[in-house]
Image: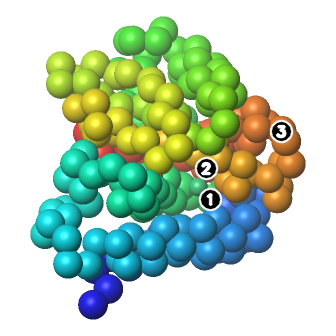
């Protein structure tokens, strides 16, 4: 039995271009994420983790189980937060007012978020989450890390593994991260509160 399946994308493979090309999605979603799903299914069968939901597996496992479960959870959140590019794209609702209140403006927030992504050494993720008091926090997580391990609720994430941008941007990680703002589906981010 396959416990986990490759998540369905809420858009076509060519819908995010030129911010994320069809070729990048074919590899990142079609091959990298599919491999994490396959590895997780193979590892979890017959273990106590088979009875937990994915977030619980991420919070309670380590080693190969954690790496694959974390990467499935991270990529499921990553790939479902996008929509077709819009140059004037900006947060809405709770997210918009909280960002303004805590960071001063969306521009200040974007700069800080991208800076955290650029300065993360090696592979990992930068996240926007809420803490138990409802305050926004930006964290860097290495490799397969997810803020649920810290008791935070993740809202938004940028993947800074090279496989996320090397086809389209080569070594220009900052250019890739700055372009992602055009394709964020802020309604989806609001629904994660
Ligand atoms: Mn990735």
Left or right of residue 61, residue 175 in this image:
right
Where is residue 95? Give x, y as percent: 37, 31
CA gap, disc 2 to disc 3?
18 Å
Task: Look at 53% across and 55% down and name the residue there.
Answer: 82
**Quarter containing the C terminus:** top left
Q: How is the image coloured?
A: rainbow
Q: How crowded is mark 2: few (under 14 residues within 10 Å), some or many (20 or more)?
A: many
Q: Earlier in the sequence, mark 2 or mark 3?
A: 3
Q: Earlier in the sequence, mark 3 or mark 1?
A: 1
Q: Mark 1 points at which residue?
A: 84
Q: Are the residues flagged by discs 2 and 1 in contact, CB closer than 8 Å?
A: yes
Vertical comparison of 74 with 49: above or below: above
Residue shown at 60% from the left, 67% from the top: 32
- Residue beneath disc 3: 172
For the point 67% across and 61% down, the residue is 16
Q: In this view, does 82 lie above or below 4?
A: above
- In the picture, measured across the screen, residue 144 lies left or right of residue 88, that is left
Report if residue 36 is visible in the image.
yes
Determine whether the residue tagged by mark 1 lies in a helix, strand or loop: loop
Tell me whether circle 3 and circle 1 mark residues in contact (CB < 8 Å).
no
Residue 39 lies, in percent from the top left, at: 45, 73
> Residue 6 placed where, x, y %?
44, 76
| Contact check, label 2 and label 3, Cβ < 8 Å | no
Tag 3 secondary structure? loop
Task: Quickly name the residue at label 2.
Answer: 183
Between 20 and 95, the one nearer to me in the picture: 20
Q: What's the distance in space between the residues labelled 3 and 1, CA to CA?
A: 22 Å
């Amino acid at each position: 039995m396959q416990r986990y399946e490759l998540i369905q994308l809420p858009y076509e493979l060519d819908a995010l271009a030129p911010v994320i090309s069809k070729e990048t999605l074919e590899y990142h979603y079609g091959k990298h994420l599919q491999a994490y799903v396959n590895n997780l299914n193979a590892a979890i069968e017959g273990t106590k983790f088979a009875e937990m939901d994915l977030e619980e597996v991420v919070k309670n496992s380590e080693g190969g189980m954690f790496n694959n479960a974390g990467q499935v959870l991270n990529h499921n959140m990553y790939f479902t937060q996008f929509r077709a590019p819009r140059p004037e794209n900006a947060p809405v609702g709770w997210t918009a007012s909280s960002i303004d209140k805590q960071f001063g403006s969306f521009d200040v927030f974007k700069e800080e978020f991208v800076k955290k992504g650029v300065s993360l050494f090696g592979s990992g993720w930068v996240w926007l989450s809420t803490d138990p008091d409802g305050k926004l926090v930006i964290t860097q997580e290495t490799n397969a890390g997810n803020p649920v391990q810290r008791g935070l609720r993740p809202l938004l994430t940028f993947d800074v593994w090279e496989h996320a941008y090397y086809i389209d941007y080569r070594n220009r990680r900052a250019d890739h991260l700055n372009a992602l703002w055009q394709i964020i589906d802020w309604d989806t981010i609001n629904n994660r509160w």
